[in-house]
Amino acid sequence: MRSLGQHIVLVFSLAVHYAMAQNAPVFSNFMHLKTLHNPAASGADGALEVFAVYRTQWVGIQGSPSVQALSLSSPLTVANSSVGVLAVNEFQGEERITSAFISYAYEQDFRSWILRAGISGGIMQRAIDGARLKAPEGRYDQGIVHNDVYIPELLSSALTGDISSGILIQTKNLYAGFSANNLLETKARFEWNAYRTEIKNTRYITAMAGYQFRFKGKLTLAPNVIMLSDFNNTQAEVNVILQYKDNIYGGLSLRGFTKSQNDALVVMAGFKLLKRIMIGYSYDFSLSALNAVNTGSHELFVGYRVNVKELLKKGKIIYSPRFL
């Protein structure tokens, strides 16, 4: 029996001549990982930021999605600009998507609020292991014969590129961003023998926002929302985070608000180490029909964040009598 991942790749990626994939991995901790969705977030708040995240979804289902990402971004000391790099490695069944992007963001300070605009571009490599797939009409008793011209018999890969752009508005307590991803809608072309299959990098948009309500006793309540859409399918998530002393936090999140999009209830928690290091974890309780065959989803991230002005601040000069 074929796994769910094999069905997804076979039916949605290879069963037709032009297959489409959204390339929008889900992250429960999106409010801490803004650069994964919006290039305008690179170097936001004047901070040098490095983070790594690992997510495994629908544990217990063979071929279920998993993703690892590494991001580095920092403001520059000139031209109100910031730069960043992002690497993502994603698995969906027998398909692997590895991408690397560089980003640039420009910031304009209007005193009471800040407007940031950013753009990113990079490359993506898709690889499909056809040897691990099985077609209904295939013969596999003496080798691999799919009897389907759109399924490779061995490992096949294709390289493509694309660009994204976005804006981000920030105030003391509010952020709101919008981005358009895969603007060029390029196609990854897989070729073997005399056959070819194409997978389109579908354009999609991302909108996110959040607000901090500050209370006495050093408590902060922060609702956040994100929406991703390719205009055919839309996924939304909203969460509420309670944080103490800008350090320890916990929260709840709900992903999906219609019967067809209902996905998960998420619990999350995190804390800071040495003021600059943040560690966060989330667990997704599946609410869809898949809840009977998986044990949930896990997400872990580790981040380092420091204000660049602190790094560049001149220390006190102490003269040594040996060199006077």
Image (cartoon, helix red, strand yellow):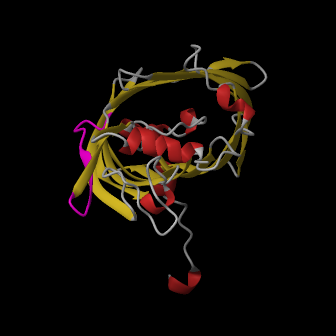
Answer with left or right where residue 230 lies relative to residue 68. Answer: left
Please, is residue 76 above or below residue 16 in the view? Answer: below
Q: Which residues are drawn in magenta? A: 181-194
Residue depicted at 51% across the width and 51% down the height: 91
Tally of numbered discs: 0
Query: Magenta stretch containing residue 188, yes or no?
Result: yes
The x, y position of residue 252, in whole percent, is: 71, 25
Specify whether residue 116 is in view: no
Residue nearest the observer in this picture, 172 or 68: 68
* Residue lying furthest right: 217
* Residue lying furthest top: 258
The x, y position of residue 224, in whole percent, is: 57, 23
Where residue 158 sits, quadrant-wise, is bottom left
Answer with left or right where residue 296 lies relative to residue 158. Answer: right
Answer with left or right where residue 15 lies relative to residue 190. Answer: right
Residue depicted at 44% across the width and 45% down the height: 10
Query: Magenta stretch containing residue 255, yes or no?
Result: no
Specify whether residue 111 is in view: yes
